[in-house]
Amino acid sequence: MTPALPHDEFFMRQALELAMEAAARGEVPVGAVVVLDGKVIGRGSNAPIGNSDPTAHAEIVALRAAGERLGNYRLPGAELYVTLEPCVMCTGAIQHARIARVIFGARDPKTGAAGSVVDLFAEPLLNHHADVTSGVLAQTCADMLSDFFRSRRAAQKAARSAHADSHCSCRPDPDLA
């Protein structure tokens, strides 16, 4: 793990804006930006639900945009800012793109592949190793995720309650009993 740099919060705030856009679409709020030479060259927000695409994680979307912009799938020297610790799939894509540095906000204790569950960036058998900086605006990133899932659980509970109170065919009508 490498320490945060002065510009890290600036770019993480851009990733947070993209995460908010994902949440507004009903997607898990994760945002990512790819930066090269101090300029954003790729942006992405989670879109697996809307795109019916399990690979449409924010990191993958941002990497695709950066690759298209540069006309190359390799992005040496680039930095990737993401609000949530990358998963195994995204870590593999980051390594194939030859990203130099990964900066993330919140840890992911269930699927994080940058140290929480596994650390693929430190795996000696793999041929590319990005520098990793964790915890940039971590609380803000974590709070956004917690708020999203809290809201989703409340909506699901309200829907179940409304369904239980209705006179649908899955529940006998008490007046007919």
Image (tube, grey):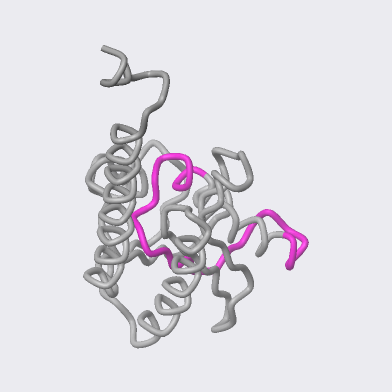
Quadrant into which the N terminus falls: bottom left
Q: Residue at x 29, y 77 (%)?
A: 4
The boundaries of the magenta stretch are 68-92
Give the percent coordinates (x, y) of residue 78: 54, 68
Q: Is residue 8 magenta?
A: no
Q: Residue furthest bottom?
A: 6
Give the percent coordinates (x, y) of residue 31: 47, 64
Q: Residue at x 31, y 59 (%)?
A: 145
- Image height of 85 relative to 70, above or below: above
Q: Residue at x 66, y 56 (%)?
A: 64
Q: Residue at x 63, y 45 (%)?
A: 51
Q: Residue 165 is drawn in which quadrant?
A: top left
- Image height of 115 relative to 103, above or below: above
Q: Along the line of sight, which residue is nearer the eye, 73 or 142?
A: 142
Give the percent coordinates (x, y) of residue 141: 30, 67
- Image height of 65 relative to 118, above or below: below
Q: Residue furthest front?
A: 175
Q: Residue 139 is drawn in which quadrant?
A: bottom left
